[in-house]
Image (cartoon, rainbow, N blue to C red):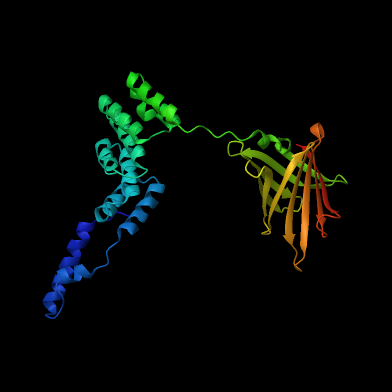
């Protein structure tokens, strides 16, 4: 544990050193020895407190943050973490004291919001509503948290709460909507068994839409147990599709291409081990109810001629 009985340790050390001084006239005084003892830095104390915080050991974490901040009160994160620990311990007044120390920087709106939560939990309704107004004025714009936070349950029937929520909702950044082209590769989404042209199992793959529809993630496992992942997105600036592939052999490949006539075509340029330039092309064909065909080719003459490297068929599980 991080916390220890500091006062008892100091008393024991002082008595021991006093005896040593009496026995050795030339020995340093207790005060001199104490001044030379190594002291933990604010950063070291904060690191230990963070570890306790991650364990949800709120008492030990709070003690550590308090000691760290006593050495360096400029650490904004420390005050925020200390406030959270005290909230979890039910010590709302002292949580407010910690949050109130945050007076500048991007954490101010959150600190003011947390003060409102502490006041609401302490039954100080009007003060909590005042703090919410200050949080909104400072730029707090998380409408989802504001509307669902159980800490604010006692305030929800207040017209002032409704007004503050309306301000937050109007100030909240609009959710990004991917361009329509980002849906062109949706035919690849699903859980698949993948076979080669002869019908033999080549592997399995799960393709899923991630990041609010901004990308597709491929999760591939071969029949031999090798695995790889790719991230696929439509770049609205370059007006092209891009794929970033990484596998468990350390291979990393970047593809770019476009979608046309139910076919996604992606190409990469690579340098072979003997220093030659090589083009790799993958084409994904939307076969409707029959699944997807993925055809891989390679060219050693800048695309004049192509040779098949694989021909795979995706069948839904």
Where residue 160 sits, quadrant-wise, is top left
Where residue 226 sits, quadrant-wise, is bottom right
Residue for point 82% across, 52% down: 297
Instruction: Report the side of 175 relative to 68 (left or right).
Output: right
Instruction: Give the position of the N terminus as an image quadrant.
Output: bottom left
| Count of numbered circles in the view | 0
Could you say where residue 177 lies in the image, as x and y percent from the top left? 58, 33
Looking at the image, can residue 1 be seen?
no
Residue for point 78% across, 51% down: 281
Could you say where residue 100 lies in the image, as x and y percent from the top left? 27, 40
Please say if 84 is above or below 222. above
Instruction: Report the side of 123 relative to 242 (left or right).
Output: left
317 or 305, which lies in front?
305
Instruction: Report the side of 111 relative to 214 (left or right).
Output: left
Where residue 278 sits, quadrant-wise, is bottom right
Could you say where residue 8 lies in the image, as x and y percent from the top left? 20, 58
Residue for point 47% across, 33% down: 173
Of all residues shown, which one is farthest toward the right?
Answer: 198
Looking at the image, can residue 245 be seen?
yes
Instruction: Give the position of the C terminus as an image quadrant.
Output: top right
197 or 177, which lies in front?
177
Could you say where residue 107 lies in the image, as x and y percent from the top left? 36, 42
Instruction: Report the side of 46 relative to 285 (left or right).
Output: left
Please say if 172 is above or below 216. above
Residue for point 20% across, 57% down: 7
Please say if 5 is above or below 211. below
């Amino acid at each position: 544990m991080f916390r220890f009985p500091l006062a008892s340790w100091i008393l024991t050390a002082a008595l021991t050193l006093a005896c040593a001084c009496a026995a050795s006239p030339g020995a340093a005084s207790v005060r001199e020895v104490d001044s030379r003892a190594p002291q933990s830095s604010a950063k070291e104390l904060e690191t230990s407190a963070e570890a306790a915080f991650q364990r949800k050991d709120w008492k030990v974490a709070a003690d550590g943050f308090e000691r760290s901040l006593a050495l360096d009160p400029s650490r904004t994160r420390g005050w925020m973490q200390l406030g959270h620990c005290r909230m979890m311990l039910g010590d709302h007044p002292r949580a407010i004291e910690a949050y109130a120390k945050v007076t500048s920087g991007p954490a101010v709106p959150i600190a003011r919001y947390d003060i409102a939560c502490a006041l609401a939990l302490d039954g100080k309704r009007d003060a909590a509503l005042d703090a919410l107004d200050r949080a909104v004025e400072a730029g707090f714009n998380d409408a989802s948290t504001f509307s669902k936070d159980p800490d604010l349950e006692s305030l929800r029937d207040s017209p002032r709460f409704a007004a503050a929520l309306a301000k937050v909702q109007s100030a909240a950044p609009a959710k990004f909507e991917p361009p329509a082209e980002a849906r062109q590769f949706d035919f690849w989404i699903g859980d698949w068994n993948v076979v080669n042209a002869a019908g033999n199992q080549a592997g399995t793959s799960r393709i899923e839409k991630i990041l609010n529809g901004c990308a597709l993630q491929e999760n591939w496992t071969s029949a031999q147990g090798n695995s790889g992942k790719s991230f696929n997105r439509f770049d609205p600036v370059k007006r092209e599709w891009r794929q970033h592939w990484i596998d468990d052999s350390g291979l990393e490949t970047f593809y770019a291409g476009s979608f046309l006539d139910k076919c996604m075509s992606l190409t990469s340029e690579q340098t072979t081990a003997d220093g030659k330039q090589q083009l790799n092309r993958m084409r994904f064909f939307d076969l409707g109810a029959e699944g997807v065909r993925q055809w891989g080719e390679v060219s050693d003459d800048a695309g004049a001629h192509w040779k098949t490297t694989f021909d795979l068929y995706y069948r839904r599980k």
